[in-house]
Image (spheres, helix red, strand yellow):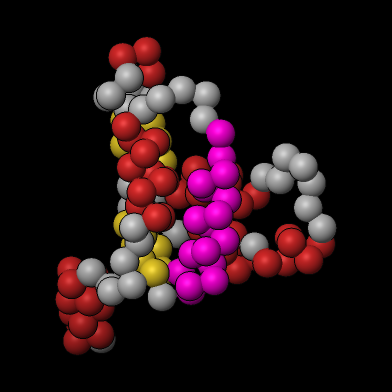
Amino acid sequence: MRYIQLKVWAIASNPDKAGILINYREQYLRTVQEFPEGATIDTLRKYFDLNAKLQAAGDHDLLELENAEHELLLTKIKAMKWAFFAVEILDLVDAVEKASSVKPLDAVLDSIAATAAT
């Protein structure tokens, strides 16, 4: 498993783009849904579960990906071309590149608390 904390950030590092929101979930979703050169049905099927997880996630959720799903997202996000520079774009890509294989402690504690409450 790989864990990515989804975020929504306003660009602050590029004065010409200041205030534009970068929504990790929306950017990742766009990344896995677009195939500029087209895609075979087998390729589309590879992205089915990843697409479903991104659609179901909230903008600030902890995204849990199987290792194969993580590799698909990493390959696509690193291949994307960007129209401008912003440190926040690098953070978006780094969140995937450096995704932890260990669930963050606060997410584990939240899970335990939710289980105890029921």
Horizontally, is 39 left or right of 30 in the view? right
Answer above or below: position of 17 versus 47.
Answer: above
Q: Residue furthest right?
A: 40
Give residue 42's position: percent from left, percent from top.
78, 66
Answer above or below: position of 71 versus 111.
Answer: above
Task: Place residue 10 in its image quadrant.
Answer: top left
Closer to the camera in the image, 37 or 25: 37
Answer above or below: position of 72 versus 89.
Answer: below
Specify the quadrant that holds the N terminus: bottom left
Answer above or below: position of 11 versus 58.
Answer: above
Specify the quadrant that holds the C terminus: bottom left
Q: What residue is at 56 percent from the left and 34 percent from the top?
A: 81
Q: Which residues are magenta?
A: 65-81
Horizontally, is 94 left or right of 115 in the view? right
Closer to the camera in the image, 11 or 37: 37
Task: Place residue 12 in its image quadrant.
Answer: top left
Residue 111 visible at all: yes
